[in-house]
Image: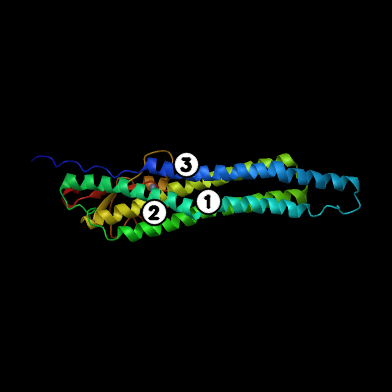
Amino acid sequence: MPRKPKTPPTRFPHAVMANYYTAVRKLIENVHSEVWQAFQKEIVPEIHKYRSSMKNDADEPPEDDNMLDKIQESMEKVREKAIKAVFSQTVMEFIARRFIRGVNKFNKRNISKQVSAVKAVDPTVNEPWLRGFMQVSVKENVNYIKTIPEEYFNRIETIVFQGVKGGKSINDMAGDIRKTKEVSVNRAKFIARDQTGSILGQMTKTRHQNMGVKKFKWSDSDDSRVRDSHESLDGRVFSYEEGADGLYPGEDFNCRCVAIPVFDDEEE
Ligand SMILES: [Zn+2]
């Protein structure tokens, strides 16, 4: 009997994920350079003024105690600008939409190839669920992106105000500010990875089920970052109805596992 053509594996859209991450990272870098400038040019001079006035008459409270107001003003100015001009609703929606469309295009093409290998009905031809799914996913991702500048500015403000209060050196504050940028960049990386996995997983599951696939084979990303619990699922077959104890590839935080379709007649 002639062997059936092999079903192409389900693939993970690494490039789409990387583009998403890069786009958000650029926004962070943009905002961070504004913050850095404000810190150097506006905030540090105020701190110096304040500290030298403390030295001159140690018993008296500093005359210039609107220094904190000036610092606050300067922080608010950058924050406002960042939200209006960098992390604007339009820009965030553009990035999120491009990302979701990218995952969809990638997955659609991938599933169509799987379909033609087994000559099933292509589920990507008519997909009434897709529009709503994409709209919701865009909204969710905009909300995730939005948390990045919020958390970033909260941290920066804490660093500056606690630093002034606690008498921290300018160098230490500068170091903390730099670290804060790294935290945000890592957060962007996390969101991109996590969202790529979960959106891809949901699209794959829906499409497989719509083409009549009842079972899938768990496939891990086969690198050092795979969690042990998923490595042990690798290669095992589960029903779409039950999943692996209710779990599906891509669902867990940061999961890059995928579901390979298993057709009724090819089960070993
Ligand atoms: Zn996984």
Q: Nearer the viewer, mark 2 or mark 3?
A: 3
Within 10 Å of the Cα at label 1, are there few (<14), some (14-19), or many (20+) other Cα atoms? many
From this view, report whether residue 86 is shown above or below residue 131: above
- Dot 3 falls on a residue whose secondary structure is helix
Where does residue 71 sit, x and y in percent of width and height? 72, 51
Disc 2 to disc 1, how far (Cα)?
27 Å
Question: Of marks 2 and 3, which one's residue comes earlier in the chain?
Answer: 3
> Who is closer to the viewer here, 57 or 215?
57
Instruction: Examine the rendering and report whether any part of residue 242 can be seen.
Output: no
**Gap between marks 3 and 1, in whole Å?**
14 Å
Mark 3 crowdedness (10 Å alpha carbons): few <14, some 14-19, many ≥20: some
Residue 77 percent coordinates (x, y): 65, 52
Q: Are marks 2 and 1 in contact (CB under 8 Å)?
A: no
Seen from the viewer's position, the closer of residues 202 and 215 is 202
Asked whether mark 3 and ligand 1 are closer than 8 Å, the reply comes as: no
Residue for point 70% across, 54% down: 73
Which labelled disc corresponds to residue 22?
A: 3
Camera-side residue: 158 or 33? 33
- Of mark 3 and mark 1, the one earlier in the sequence is 3
* Secondary element at tag 2: loop
Image check: 5 left or right of 188?
left
Q: Amino acid at mark 3?
A: Thr
Name the residue at 35% across, 59% down.
Answer: 133
Q: Secondary structure at mark 1?
A: loop
The amino acid marked with disc number 2 is Glu
Looking at the image, which residue is at 44% across and 47% down? 192
Q: Quadrant of the N terminus?
A: top left
Rendered image: mark on residue 87:
1
Percent across and percent down for residue 59 are 91, 52
Task: Give the class, few, some or many, for how many residues have Cα within 10 Å of label 2's Cα (few <14, many ≥20).
Answer: many
Numbered label attached to residue 251: 2
